Amino acid sequence: MTVLWSDHVADLMPYMPGEQANIPNLLKLNTNEHPYGPSPLAIAAIREAASEDLRLYPDYQALALRQTIAQRYGVTPDQVFLGNGSDEILAHAFNALFLRQGRPLLMPDVTYSFYQTYCCLYRVPHVCLPLADDFSIRISDYIDWKGEAPAGIIFANPNAPTGKLLGLDDIAAIVRAHPDSSVVVDEAYIDFGGRSAVELLAQFDNVLVIHTFSKSRSLAGLRVGYAMGSTSVIEALTRTKDSFNSYPIDRLAQAGARASMLDEAYFQSTRRAVMDARELLTQKMVTLGFNVLPSQANFVFARHPQHDARQIQRLLREQGVLVRHFQQPRIAEYLRITVGSPEDCERLCNALTLILDESH
Ligand SMILES: *Cc1c(COP(=O)(O)O)cnc(C)c1O
């Protein structure tokens, strides 16, 4: 019955999330969820919010949560924007910032694939600039860009799915070179070893930094993301959001996210545990013969010179271990594997050992 569809729907390119399988004794290392649960204080706050008050709409401005985030990062509440997951913030950013007289959006050829989806949805003209051979972002391609002045530039940092980090000075150089473009830095993984570009807000109005509670704060199921930018950029996002859905962050989400943000000690210890496990996993996989890119995220990106990535993924799945593979030019040989607990990493490596042994 596609005759009933709006004209553009057949041409959409929906994002394909990693599998949420229903397999007994599953080890899920395919969507970069956190191995440890959220802060117990967050769970308690959600329980408390699950009350009669749910008959009332939430605070559409989510002021308490925005104040807490602003304080944590040294910005003002009107520099903070919230979304139902950072994916929703990205959608609003594409709509609010990247549609300017046909000017292009610049982004890496290998990055978070949702950006392509939003380009398609909002018909944002875009140019993909190839990463260097070692998968680093070549900042000169952006700084010395000779084409039409871009409406914006977007990349994930650390980049997905490579885990490679771009330094703050390099980001500042891009931002400085394009004062009339919005530079959106998607920092979904920044808490696993990078330095946030939020510092640049003291100097620049044209940078938007997007974070999520889904990864380092282990609240993927709560659906909360936040962005920090100049008041003018945040106003553009807010106008767009309030033309779409005034209440994207429900009462439970506002309470849970705020309690999570206030529990600094839990945040620090759990992110540290993941970073330690990442080093352990990297070493073990190198021992198994994998090339593992140095990662500053909660996943590793690795290939085995003698084994097909797709095949390894399939055989891992037979052992109840899910990892992510992207059938995409340049990276089809790689697997993206979430860093779990030390026990998770051990189970993964045992499964990999079995697969590599059996195929000889
Ligand atoms: C996981 C992820 C997101 C989305 O996170 P949500 O807040 O759960 O929507 C955004 N960007 C990148 C690069 C991610 O990996």
Image (cartoon, rainbow, N blue to C red):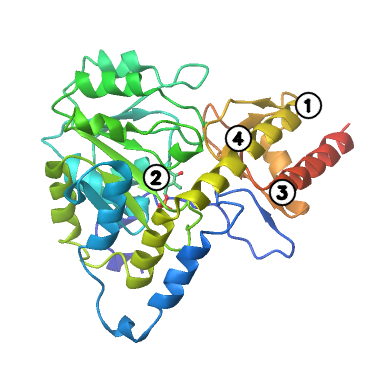
Q: Circle 2 is placed at which residue position?
A: 114
Secondary element type, mark 4: strand
Q: Circle 1 is placed at which residue position?
A: 287
Secondary element type, mark 2: helix
CB within 8 Å, label 2 to label 4: no
Secondary element type, mark 3: helix
Q: Circle 3 is placed at which residue position?
A: 344
Residue 149 placed where, x, y %?
A: 16, 23
Q: Which mark is residue 110?
A: none
Pointer 1 or 2: first along the chain: 2
Residue 132 placed where, x, y %?
A: 46, 17
Disc 4 crowd rating (10 Å Cα; few below 14, some 14-19, many 20+) is many
Q: Is mark 2 within 8 Å of ligand 1?
A: yes
Disc 2 crowd rating (10 Å Cα; few below 14, some 14-19, many 20+) is some
Pointer 1 or 3: first along the chain: 1
- Asked whether 135 or 248 is in front, the reply is 248
Report the Cα–Cα distance between label 3 and label 2: 28 Å
- The N terminus lies in which quarter of the figure? bottom left
User: Is 309 displayed left or right of 215 in the figure?
Assistant: right
Q: Circle 4 is placed at which residue position?
A: 300
Report the Cα–Cα distance between label 1 and label 2: 33 Å
